[in-house]
Image (cartoon, rainbow, N blue to C red):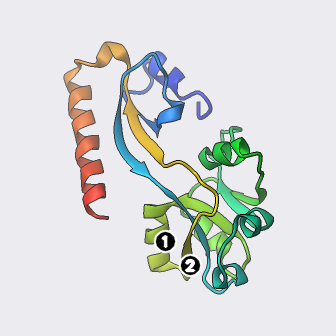
Amino acid sequence: QVDHPQRDLERGEADLLVLPRPLMSADHPHELLYEERFVCVLWSGSALARAPLTAERYLAAGHVIMRPQASRAHTFEDAFIRKLGMERRVVATSYGFTPMAGLLLGTELIATLHARLARQMARVWPLAIVPCPIEIAPMEQAIQWHAYRTQDQGIVWLRSLFQQASQTLASAD
């Protein structure tokens, strides 16, 4: 249920959801785990990486995006770009973030990714990381659980593990 993950909570098929805050259900509690800003990732040998990335160059370039296999929804950053009345030219999609790096190599394509993930990819692949020329609000990643299970000790414990992991992630920056 990628397009409607809250159904899994309602049906008792999921204990916790990990989602961007705008996708959370208003009917159930949630906690913020971390915020993530967006950057652009390019092959380091591309012409795009050798000159400042303007909004015009960004929108004219071909884009690689991640879209889960079962989803028809727009990506998180698409919402902000569309709100500005702009549209990207998507030329390739991936079912996961990690394969996106390989799709950029040897091309003039761009991927708009979370900054932490981009830094990890650039340690392994010849990639350039540049600021995104389009203002995209930081993504707020959160966890959500069913309101009836707020006092469930297993859920309380699992939430604490997610909070500890997100603090470790933040301290690694």
Q: Residues within 10 Å of mark 2 (few under 14, many from 20)?
A: many
Determine the CA span between mark 2 and mark 1. Answer: 8 Å
Res. 43 image quadrant: bottom right
Residue 41: x percent and y percent?
Answer: 59, 70
Q: Are marks 2 and 1 in contact (CB under 8 Å)?
A: yes
Q: What kind of element bears circle 1?
A: helix
Residue at the location (19% across, 23% down)? 153
Residue at the location (59% across, 35% down)? 2
Q: Which mark is residue 138?
A: none
Q: Residues within 10 Å of mark 1 (few under 14, many from 20)?
A: many
Q: What kind of element bears circle 2?
A: strand
Name the quarter where the C terminus is drawn.
bottom left
Residue at the location (30% across, 17% down)? 149
Name the quarter where the N terminus is drawn.
top right
Report which residue position mark 2 lands on. 127
Residue at the location (53% across, 79% down)? 125
Amino acid of disc 1? Met
Q: Is residue 19 left or right of residue 130?
A: left
Residue 172: x percent and y percent?
Answer: 28, 64
Q: Is residue 91 left or right of residue 163?
A: right
Report which residue position mark 1 lands on. 121
Residue 80: x percent and y percent?
Answer: 64, 45
Return the residue nearer the eye: 73 or 58.
Answer: 58
Amino acid of disc 2? Leu
Tell me if residue 87 comes above or below residue 145 in the rendering. below
Residue 76: x percent and y percent?
Answer: 60, 45
